[in-house]
Image: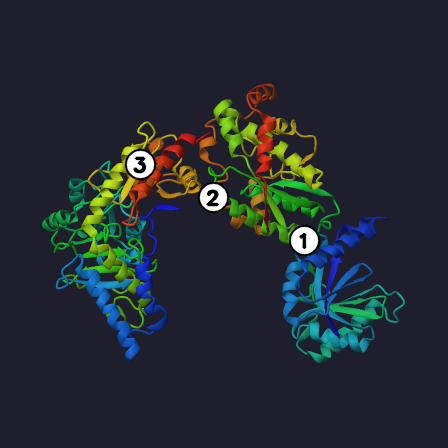
C-alpha cells in the first residue's frame, strides 16, 4: 500500500494530436512546482501520480499542486494491488468511521472480473461490518470512498476530489509581457492569461524619486505571489521619470497620462521582442479610469503592432477584487504606496483624447531618445 | 550620508554603546536576581534612573519609570490621568498623544484640542479657555516635532492649575530632553522622554512623574518591576545606553544648543529664498528647521536628497489619501506649502560643513523638481 497524490488534468484531453505536447509541458510544470520536495512523478493514462514523498510533505505538495494551471482536481489517496482484499484494506483507512457514506467505483480496466456495482456492494458491506456507526446513503452521502480500478493491475482509493485551478499548462500558449503596476487589476490580468497557458514576463514602470522604493518592493512582492501560479523567476523594471518630466514640462496637462501610456506600450513592445513574447497584457477594464476609455485604449494601441490582451476589460471592480482575494494578491495590492506621484496627475485628464491632438503634442518630445534612455535603465529583480 | 533627520531618530552614540557593552555581554543578569550579577545590573538601573531624572528635575519631587518607548510613556500617562470629565490637549501633538486622546472618547472622556499659532506652538489663551472644572488632564507637547516650536510648559502648567487646581498637567518631552536646557517646574505632573532621540537606542523611554500625583496606573502587569508601574524584565543594556548617551549630551547641552542654533540659521541663510519658505520659528528648538518648497512634493525631494547623500525628514507623503501633516495643517498653511515640507533636524555631532552641503543639495534638488 502506497500513499499517493492523484492529479487529474483539465482541458488537455481536448487536444487531439497535440495532446502529447500539452502533457509534456504539464509534467514539467508539476516538477517545477514540486522542486525541493522529495517525490516521484509517474504518468499513467489520463492521470499523474505523485508518490514516494514523506508523509509530512503531503500537505505542502497538495498546496503547490493546487496552484498549477492545468490541474482539474487532485486527491490524496492510496495505491494498492487490485484484488478486493487489498482494496478493502485501503478503503478501511480512507473511510470515515461514522455518518453516511457510499462507495463509488470507476473502472478504467474494463476486463476487471467484478463490475462497478458489484465492487460498490462488496466493499460497502465490509466497511459497514467494520464500522457499525456507518450508514449507507447513495444519494446525498456525507462521505464517499472512491475506487479507481486502473489498467495496470492497481487500484487507487481516496476520499475526496479537491478542485484544482483548471486552465492550461503555462507555456503552451506562448509568452506575453504583463504591464504590472502596484494596483489590484494587473496581477489578476496576469493570472488570467497564465491560466490560459501563457507564460508571463513581468514589466514594471516606476518614476523614482517621484515614486518610492516601498512601491517598487510591493510590485516585486505581487510578482512573487503570482509566480507561484505562473512560474517566472524575475521582474523587469523600467524608469520612466524623465519621460514624465518631459511630458509635464512640454505637453498639454490633460494628456499627461495618455502620453505616458503610449510610451509604456512602446517600451513594453520592445521588451516583448527582446524576450520573445508575442503580446502585451494589461489590467485595463473599460471605463474604470480616464485612460481606460475606448478612446484612451485606441491611443495606446496606435503605437504598437503586437496584440494587447485585456482579460479584465468587461469586469467590474468588485469582480476583480474577488479574484484578487482568491489569488492572494489583494492584501499586497492595497498597501498604501502610490505608483505615481500626484504631481504628474492632471486635475482634469482627457477622457476622450483625439489621436490627432495626441500626436501633435507628442511631436514636442524626442520620443525615440526617451525610449532608449528608459530602456537603458531596465533592471532585472529576481523573485 | 549626511544625516539630518535627528528628530526621527539619531545614530546611537558609539561611546555610549562601548560603555554599555558590558551590560549586554558580561553583566546580562536579570536585575531582579538575588545574586551578585543581578545586584550589579540593578545598581546600574538605579544610577541611570538618578542621573536621567536629576538632569531635568528635582529628584525629591519627581520619580522616573523606564518604559519601552516614548509612546508607551505617553499612553500610560494619558490613560491613567484622564478618567472622567474632559481632557485638553493641542492640535500640535505627536500621534502618541493625539491618537490616545481620540481613544479617550471611547472611554467616556471628552477630548478637546486647542488650536495652534502659525509656528506650531499652542495658542495659550485658547487652550486655557478649554480648561474648566471638569478637566482632569491637560497635555501640551514641549517641543513640536514638526516645527521645533517650544511651548512654555512651566507657565502653561501654572496657569492651568490656577484655573483647574485638580487637573493634571503632562508634557511630551521627546524632542526637548537632552536637546534644550530646562527644568521641570512643580506644576508639571507627568513628562515623557525617549532614548533614541539623543543617541540611545530604540526600545527605551521613560515616564517622569511628580510624586504628588499618586494615581499612575500600571498598563503592563506581571513581575512588579519599576515599583509595580511597569512590569517586564528591564532593558538593562538599552537603559545603560540611554544613561551614557545622556551623560554625553548633558555635558555640553548649552554650548551645543547655541552652536546648533547657529547652524540652523546658517542653513536657512544658504537656502534659495525664491524657492523656500520657513515654517520654524526663530526662538524654537535649535535642532529643527522646517521649511517648504511650494510646488514640490516633500517626499520626492527627500528621495532626491537621499540620492545626493543627505537624509532629511518630511511633513508630507505622496499619498492622495492622507497627503499632509496634520499638525502643519492645523498651523493654517495652504496646500501648496503643505505639499513641499521638509524637516532638517540636527544633532551635536553635525558640523557646519555638513549643514552647508545639505543647503546646497536642497537648492539643487528643488530646482530639478519636475524636470
| Picture residue at 36% right of the left edge, 35% below the top | B360
Q: Secondary structure at mark 3?
A: strand
Tell us which disc is closer to us: 2 or 3.
3
Q: Secondary structure at mark 2?
A: loop
Quadrant assignment, res B277: top left
- Work out whether disc 3 and disc 1 sit on a shared chain: no
Q: Is residue A83 left or right of residue B231?
A: right
Q: Which x, y percent locates residue B215?
A: 19, 63
| Picture residue at 72% right of the left edge, 53% below the top | A70
Q: Looking at the image, do the residues carrying marks 3 and 1 touch, with CB atoms under 8 Å apart?
A: no
Report the disc number at residue A165.
Answer: 1
Question: Residue B265 or B313: which is nearer the viewer?
Answer: B265
The crowd level at tag 3 (other Cα within 10 Å; few <14, some 14-19, many 20+) is many
Q: Earlier in the sequence, mark 1 or mark 2?
A: 1
Q: Chain of mark 2?
A: A
Report the disc number at residue A337.
Answer: 2
Q: CA gap, disc 3 to disc 1?
A: 55 Å
Question: Residue A164 or A237: which is nearer the viewer?
Answer: A237
Q: Which x, y percent locates residue A210?
A: 46, 37
Amino acid at each position: 500500500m502506497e500513499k499517493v497524490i492523484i492529479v487529474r488534468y483539465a482541458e488537455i484531453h481536448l487536444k487531439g494530436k497535440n495532446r502529447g505536447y500539452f502533457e509534456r509541458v504539464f509534467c514539467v510544470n508539476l516538477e517545477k512546482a514540486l522542486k525541493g520536495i522529495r517525490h516521484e512523478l509517474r504518468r499513467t493514462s489520463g492521470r499523474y501520480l505523485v508518490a514516494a514523498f514523506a508523509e509530512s510533505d503531503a500537505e505542502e505538495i497538495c498546496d503547490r499542486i493546487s496552484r498549477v494551471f492545468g490541474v482539474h482536481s487532485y486527491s490524496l489517496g492510496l495505491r494498492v494491488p487490485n484484488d478486493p482484499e487489498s482494496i478493502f484494506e485501503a478503503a478501511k483507512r480512507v473511510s470515515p468511521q461514522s455518518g453516511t457514506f457510499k462507495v463509488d467505483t470507476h473502472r478504467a480496466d474494463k476486463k476487471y472480473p467484478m463490475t462497478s456495482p458489484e465492487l460498490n456492494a462488496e466493499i460497502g458491506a465490509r466497511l459497514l461490518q467494520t464500522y457499525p456507526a456507518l450508514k449507507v446513503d447513495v444519494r446525498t452521502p456525507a462521505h464517499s470512498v472512491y475506487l479507481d480500478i486502473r489498467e495496470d493491475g492497481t487500484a487507487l482509493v481516496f476520499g475526496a476530489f479537491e478542485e484544482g485551478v483548471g486552465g492550461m499548462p503555462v507555456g503552451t500558449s506562448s509568452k506575453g509581457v504583463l504591464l504590472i503596476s502596484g494596483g489590484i487589476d494587473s496581477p489578476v490580468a496576469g493570472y488570467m492569461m497564465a491560466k490560459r497557458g501563457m507564460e508571463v514576463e513581468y514589466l514594471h514602470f516606476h518614476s523614482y524619486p517621484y515614486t518610492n522604493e516601498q512601491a517598487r518592493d510591493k510590485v516585486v512582492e505581487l510578482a512573487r505571489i503570482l509566480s507561484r501560479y505562473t512560474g517566472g523567476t524575475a521582474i523587469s523594471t523600467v524608469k520612466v521619470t524623465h519621460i514624465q518630466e518631459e511630458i509635464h514640462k512640454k505637453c498639454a496637462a490633460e494628456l499627461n497620462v495618455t502620453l505616458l501610456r503610449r510610451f509604456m506600450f512602446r517600451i513594453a513592445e520592445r521588451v516583448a521582442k527582446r524576450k520573445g513574447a508575442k503580446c502585451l497584457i494589461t489590467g485595463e477594464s473599460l471605463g474604470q479610469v480616464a485612460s481606460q476609455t475606448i478612446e484612451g485604449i485606441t491611443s495606446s494601441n496606435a503605437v504598437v503592432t503586437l496584440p494587447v490582451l485585456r482579460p479584465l476589460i468587461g469586469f467590474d471592480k468588485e469582480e476583480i477584487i474577488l479574484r484578487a482575494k482568491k489569488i492572494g494578491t489583494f492584501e499586497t495590492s492595497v498597501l498604501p504606496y502610490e505608483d505615481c506621484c500626484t504631481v504628474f496627475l492632471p486635475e482634469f485628464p482627457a477622457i476622450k483624447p483625439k489621436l490627432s491632438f495626441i500626436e501633435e503634442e507628442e511631436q514636442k518630445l524626442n520620443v525615440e531618445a526617451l525610449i532608449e534612455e528608459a530602456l537603458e535603465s531596465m533592471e532585472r529583480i529576481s523573485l | 550620508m549626511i544625516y539630518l533627520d535627528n528628530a526621527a531618530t539619531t545614530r546611537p552614540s558609539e561611546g555610549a554603546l562601548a560603555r554599555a557593552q558590558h551590560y549586554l555581554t558580561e553583566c546580562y543578569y536579570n536585575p531582579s536576581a538575588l545574586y551578585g550579577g543581578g545586584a550589579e545590573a540593578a545598581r546600574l538601573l538605579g544610577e541611570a534612573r538618578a542621573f536621567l531624572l536629576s538632569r531635568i528635575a528635582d529628584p525629591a519631587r519627581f520619580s522616573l519609570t523606564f518604559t519601552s518607548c516614548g509612546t508607551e510613556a505617553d499612553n500610560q500617562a494619558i490613560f491613567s490621568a484622564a478618567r472622567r470629565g474632559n481632557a485638553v490637549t493641542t492640535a500640535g501633538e505627536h500621534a502618541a498623544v493625539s491618537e490616545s486622546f481620540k481613544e479617550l472618547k471611547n472611554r467616556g472622556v471628552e477630548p478637546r484640542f486647542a488650536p495652534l499659532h502659525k509656528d506650531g506652538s499652542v495658542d495659550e489663551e485658547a487652550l486655557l479657555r478649554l480648561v474648566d472644572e471638569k478637566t482632569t488632564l491637560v497635555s501640551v507637547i514641549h517641543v513640536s516635532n514638526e516645527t521645533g516650536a517650544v511651548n512654555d510648559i512651566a507657565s502653561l502648567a501654572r496657569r492651568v492649575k490656577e484655573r483647574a487646581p485638580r487637573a493634571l498637567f503632562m508634557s511630551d518631552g521627546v524632542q526637548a530632553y537632552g536637546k534644550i536646557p530646562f527644568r521641570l517646574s512643580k506644576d508639571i505632573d507627568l513628562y515623557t522622554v525617549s532614548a533614541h532621540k539623543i543617541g540611545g537606542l530604540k526600545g527605551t523611554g521613560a515616564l517622569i512623574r511628580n510624586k504628588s500625583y499618586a494615581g499612575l496606573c500600571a498598563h503592563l502587569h506581571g513581575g512588579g518591576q519599576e515599583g509595580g508601574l511597569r512590569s517586564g524584565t528591564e532593558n538593562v543594556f538599552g537603559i545603560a545606553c540611554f544613561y551614557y548617551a545622556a551623560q554625553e549630551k548633558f555635558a555640553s547641552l548649552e554650548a551645543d544648543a547655541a552652536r546648533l542654533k547657529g547652524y540652523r540659521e546658517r542653513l536657512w541663510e544658504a537656502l534659495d529664498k525664491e524657492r523656500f519658505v520657513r515654517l520654524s520659528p526663530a526662538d524654537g528648538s535649535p535642532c529643527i528647521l522646517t521649511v517648504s518648497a511650494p510646488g514640490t512634493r516633500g517626499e520626492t525631494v527627500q528621495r532626491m536628497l537621499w540620492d545626493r547623500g543627505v537624509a532629511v525628514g518630511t511633513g508630507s507623503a505622496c499619498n492622495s489619501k492622507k497627503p499632509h501633516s496634520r499638525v502643519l495643517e492645523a498651523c493654517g498653511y495652504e496646500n501648496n506649502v503643505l505639499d513641499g515640507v521638509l524637516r532638517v533636524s540636527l544633532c551635536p555631532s553635525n558640523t557646519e560643513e555638513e549643514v552647508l552641503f545639505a543647503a546646497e543639495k536642497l537648492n539643487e534638488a528643488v530646482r530639478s523638481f519636475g524636470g
